Amino acid sequence: MTVELPDLTGIRLVASDLDSTLLTSQKTISERTRAAIRAAHEAGIIVLTATGRQLATMPDPVFETEISYAVASNGAVGYDYVRQEVLFIEEIGPAAQQAVVAYLADHAPGTVYAAGRGTGDVFLVEPGFQALMTERERLYDRRKLVPTPLPKIVSEPTIKLCARHPEITPDELLDILDAGRLPGCHPATSGAPFVEISRADVNKAAGLARICGPLQIGPEQVVAVGDAKNDVEMLRWAGVGVAVANAVPEALAAAGFTTASNDDDGLALVIEALVG
């Protein structure tokens, strides 16, 4: 399969979502995608991952590539893989978190919560949240999980507040939160089994812009590839937005172009078109 893209002259950076975009359904990186990332690196084109994951939950295959930067926690954290340096942290404050908890107590009782501290190496979890975690969630988890009462969880700033419900789906929970129009927060879903709530001005596009600024890279020099609702802002911000074939309708609508699915090397096709 080939992918139809506009003239890519002047593109200097490829920003890819991680789960269901760069990673296959088996949470691996195909050899073709590895080779494409390596070719981009050799051509002087930066490849970074923009993900909802916290740094401590990055799967091992990511560290085996020439990926230069990470925009993590839906834009709340920037990280330089080469220098192993945290570039920025943007947190949502206690008041906004507490407003979410109070609202969902009325509109989705039974919701349970977790939140990262720092860059996410420490993850405070309500016991009910931890009980719902799947084995796949724990597979690449390097975080220290700390069972914590809810008042303590929402008493300090965090990079991301996670809300999940044993019966209400993440997308349904997102719709409930969107209807509330709560100030100070930006909820999103990524395909994970929970809603991820950041500060109002934090999203992948904002985080990507913060990485690109010091590099003197403008949005017109960026290709962004994604699949989920938390990719929408990034797909719109980039000069060229590309959705993988397995993307949700919102991501497909936000992107100007479409490539193959994550299991059919959709990202590799985009990079190969770029580097020739």
Image: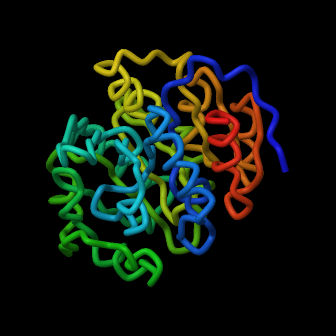
Of residues 197 and 270, the one nearer the viewer is 270
Q: Nearer the viewer, residue 116 or 41?
A: 41
**In the rendering, at what x and y percent does residue 17 appear?**
53, 48
Residue lying at 48% horizontally and 54% vertically, measured from the top left = 195
Q: Residue at x 33, y 21 (%)?
A: 215
Where is residue 23 shown, x and y percent of the image? 56, 62
All told, the count of numbered labels is 0
Q: For this rendering, which residue is in front, 143 or 160? A: 143
Q: Answer with left or right where residue 220 lies relative to residue 162.
A: right
| Residue 250 % position (x, y) | 70, 40
Q: Which residue is drawn at 45% across and 44% down?
A: 50
Q: Measured from the top left, where is residue 91 in percent x and y?
A: 24, 39
Q: Which residue lies furthest to the right in this view?
A: 1
Colouring of the image? rainbow
Query: Which of the 4 image quadrants contains residue 54?
Result: bottom left
- Quarter of the image with the C terminus is top right
2 left or right, relative to 212: right
Identify the residue shown where x is 61% and y is 66%: 24
Instruction: Determine the image quadrant of residue 85.
Output: top left
